[in-house]
Amino acid sequence: MRPTAPNRAPVQEGPRINERIKALEVRLIDETGGQVGVISTRDALLRAEEAGLDLVEVSPDAVPPVCRLIDFGKFKYQQSKKAQEAKKKQVVIEVKELNLTPNTDAHDIETKQNHIRRWVAEKNRVRVGVKFRGREMSHQELGHEVLQQLIKGIEDLVVPEAPPRMEGRRLTITLLPRSEKEK
């Protein structure tokens, strides 16, 4: 039989509150947001109890730790709202991928340019790859020509991140949307 794990207290996520604060002294912020100063944790707990609030450790890494008198439920609500706002402001940049061959026709390139225009308008990066099959590897200059032809039609909208490079049997280049200043 396997030995059982010793009984451990569950690991608490988030800030420590009330009696779980281990520091001897804390820097206290009252319910109005004013700074009370550095006082003993016991005195801070008494103040929290008198006010009917919780003592919440806001900044545990500070010396001494910063604690605040606030209702813990309200504190958690405020934290979740802050997290939601931060998540809203994040911009997700996608990398769209486009595949060509060395013998891609001019009309097909125009169609691919229209795709790139749409993606760049949405502020996405575009990775363009030219795939070589069989004996096409001996004519890599055709792949470079196709890429140059593609970029020439949309150079007012995109800027190459780096020159084209070979990755196995693929010639790839990443195109970034031009910033408003560059246009």
Image (tube, rainbow, N blue to C red):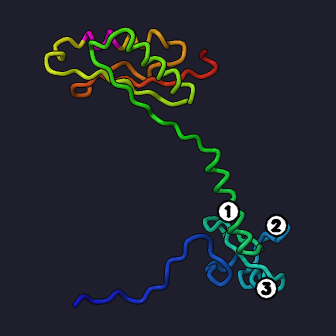
Quadrant containing the N terminus is bottom left
Q: Position of residue 172 (x, y in %)?
A: 33, 24
* Mark 2 element type: strand
Query: 10 Å neighbourhood of mark 3: few (<14), some, or many (≥20)?
Result: some
Residue at image location 66% in from the left, 78% down from the top: 17
Q: Amino acid at mark 1?
A: Gln
Query: 10 Å neighbourhood of mark 2: few (<14), some, or many (≥20)?
Result: few
Q: Is residue 113 left or right of residue 75?
A: left
Q: Nearer the viewer, mark 2 or mark 1?
A: 1
Residue 56: image quadrant is: bottom right
Q: Amino acid at mark 3?
A: Glu
Asked if labels 2 and 3 touch by Cβ distance under 8 angstroms, the answer is no
Q: Nearer the viewer, mark 1 or mark 3?
A: 1
Q: CA distance from mark 3 to mark 2?
A: 18 Å
Sequence order check, earlier mark of 2 and 1? 2
Q: Which residues are magenta?
A: 141-146
Quadrant containing the C terminus is top right
Sequence order check, earlier mark of 1 and 3? 3
The residue pinned by badge 2 equals: 35
Q: Nearer the viewer, mark 3 or mark 2?
A: 3
Q: Is residue 10 left or right of residue 148?
A: right
Q: Position of residue 164 (x, y in %)?
A: 34, 19
Q: Position of residue 4 (x, y in %)?
A: 32, 89
User: Main SS of the magenta segment?
Assistant: helix
In the rendered image, residue 143 lying in the magenta stretch gets the answer yes
Residue at image location 55% in from the left, 72% down from the top: 13
The residue pinned by badge 3 equals: 49
In the rendered image, residue 79 lying in the magenta stretch gets the answer no
Q: Which mark is residue 79?
A: 1
Residue at image location 48% in from the left, 36% down from the top: 94
- Counting labels gives 3
Q: Position of residue 111 (x, y in %)?
A: 43, 17
